[in-house]
Image (cartoon, grey):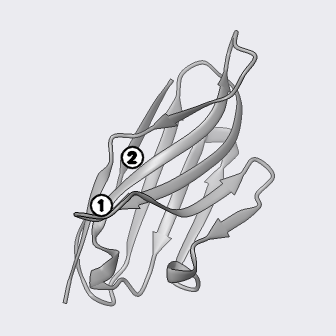
């Protein structure tokens, strides 16, 4: 199982970016997909998550600006980021909690991270 994240970049404050994460491999049950971020000198934090049923959570600091969505048929999750602020600058990581084929327990998988830089 692999997670491939893309879509980061450099943007001015107030701008937008869309992150994508594709989960591939022998996946039996993709339970939850999420985006985390880690800024320099800070701990990794959950930004948003979405379940297989479509229920979403967004951390308070991004509510109204970021939206997580999911295409279950393609095992893909997106993070639409609008009205970006310099404090959103971080490496964004894709996470998936899933059950691989031939396994009977769930595990967490991580993508490689994509840099988002917001200039003031």
Residue drawn at the location 81% of the way across and 52% of the way down: 53
Q: Residue furthest top?
A: 102
**In the foreground, 72 or 31:** 31
Query: Where on the picture, by quarter, is residue 3?
Result: top left
Side of 98 relative to 11 (left or right): right
Residue drawn at the location 61% of the way across and 71% of the way down: 58
- Residue identified by numbered label 1: 8
Residue 10, given in percent of the width and then of the height, sits at 20, 71
**Secondary structure under the numbered disc 1 in the rendered image:** loop
Q: Is residue 94 above or below residue 16?
A: above
Query: Where on the picture, by quarter, is residue 103?
Result: top right
**Secondary structure under the numbered disc 2 in the rendered image:** strand
Question: Mark number for residue 59?
Answer: none
- The quadrant of the picture occupied by the C terminus is bottom left
- Residue identified by numbered label 2: 5
Q: Given contact means CB atoms under 8 Å apart, are the residues at marks 2 and 1 in contact?
A: yes
Query: Where on the picture, by quarter, is residue 8?
Result: bottom left
């Amino acid at each position: 199982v692999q997670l491939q994240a893309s879509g980061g970049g450099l943007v001015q404050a107030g701008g937008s970016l869309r992150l994508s994460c594709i989960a591939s491999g022998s996946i039996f049950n993709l339970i939850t997909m999420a985006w985390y971020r880690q800024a320099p000198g800070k701990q990794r934090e959950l930004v948003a998550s979405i379940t297989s049923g479509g229920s979403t959570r967004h951390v308070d600091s991004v509510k109204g600006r970021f939206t997580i969505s999911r295409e279950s048929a393609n095992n893909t999750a997106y993070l639409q980021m609008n009205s970006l602020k310099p404090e959103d600058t971080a490496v964004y990581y894709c996470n998936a909690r899933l059950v691989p084929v031939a396994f009977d327990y769930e595990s967490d998988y991580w993508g490689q991270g994509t840099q988002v830089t917001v200039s003031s």
